[in-house]
Image: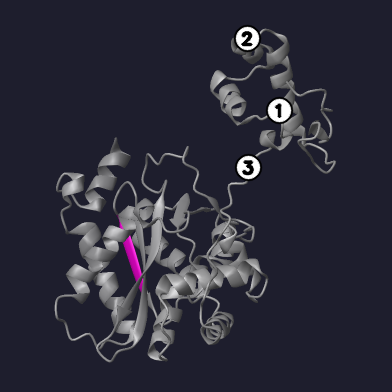
Amino acid sequence: MRYGVSMNTYGTIVPKLFSLKSKSLSRPAKQRLKWMDYYQTHNHNARLTCRHFGISPDVFYRWKRRYSPYDLRSLEDIPSRPTNTRHPNTDPLAIKRIKYLRELHPRWGKKKIHAILVSEGFSISESGVGRTLHRLRIRGLLNEPPIVTARLAGKKRRYAKRLHAERRDWAYLPKLPGDLVQLDTLHITTCDHKRRYQFTASDYISKHTARQASHSITSTAASHMLDTIAQRMPITPKVIQVDGGSEFKAVFEKACAQRGIRLFVLPPHSPKLNGMVERMNRTSREEIYDLGLDFTLNIEEHNQLLEEQDHIYNHIRPHEALGLRTPDEYYKSIITN
């Protein structure tokens, strides 16, 4: 029993026992007090009380054991936060150094910063660096670029809308040569330690290939591949599939639009979806660049070599995937049928 105590405030619970300063109960505590009133006025029938208020017996009995009619605060939620919490004791100089390094190099994580601190003689763990960064961030003491804070908050990067390219349409299924041509780049280092870039195109159905080397990896250089494809493949591509590289934007995208070629762009970090041309890049390495040739050709000689290799690949080299036929033989067998 509550001895006539008001449901809304604390008051004198038992005369001459003790008194409490007037204070309002929280809404959940008032509701639990109703449970106890109903239980007292209905012959201590716990099951009836549970059915009336739509609560489980476990919940009711837990609060009944905690309830004291002499102290209505027993119906209040007990904070789960521990009374005594550990306070960080990180060296202030280390905190200052961590803040400086992170703001100077926003892309550096705790591992890199920890390695720098250790080399400077600080005694702190890698986890300690991570916790310090977190505390600085939640207190608003870390000045980071918006792109970093957006990534930490789990926001997806927004990509600019492209004029002609579109995400890969998975309902589109290539059935004939030219329905889908995959295009990718291969990075090459010459004997004199210079960088070159091979653009590789592979037809998904007939396995025809076309390759071209360039000094630069630009959209203009990539657009020249459309002419190479037209010269070395017997088909006109309906769809070209590329990754999200910058070389397949701007001039290249505009050239595809002018020729009426659809341009599919794959999601980031998914080379397996361009598996045909990725395998062709491996073939280029194994059959051209890894054979120990004296690779000191200039760019014109390099492209002449690729043209010769494309002729061998398309017209002479048997392919197990095509029943030991060449891509050209396979293509002719399709168009004659």
Question: How packed is label 3: few (under 14 Cα within 10 Å), some, or many (20 or more)?
Answer: few
Q: Amino acid at mark 2?
A: Asn
Q: Is residue 219 magenta?
A: no
Query: Disc number at residue 78?
Result: 3
Nearer the observer, 117 or 204:
117
Q: Could you tell me which quadrant the N terminus lies in?
A: top right
Foreground mark, 1 or 3?
Answer: 1
Q: Quadrant of the C terminus?
A: top left
Tell me whether circle 2 and circle 1 mark residues in contact (CB < 8 Å).
Answer: no
Q: Is residue 317 left or right of residue 64?
A: left
Find residue 59 and report its horizontal and vertical position in percent.
58, 25
Q: Is residue 280 above or below residue 327?
A: below
Nearer the observer, 85 or 42: 42
Looking at the rendering, the stretch of residues picked out in magenta corresponds to 208-212
Q: Left or right: where does residue 275 sit relative to residue 164?
A: left
Question: What residue lies at 63% left-to-right and 75% top-to-bottom?
Answer: 142
The residue to which callout 2 is attached is: 45
Q: Residues within 10 Å of mark 1 (few under 14, many from 20)?
A: some
Taking the spot 47% from the left edge, 74% from the top edge, the residue there is: 129
Give amino acid for label 3.
Ile
Q: Main secondary structure of the magenta part?
A: strand
Identified by mark 1, the residue type is Pro
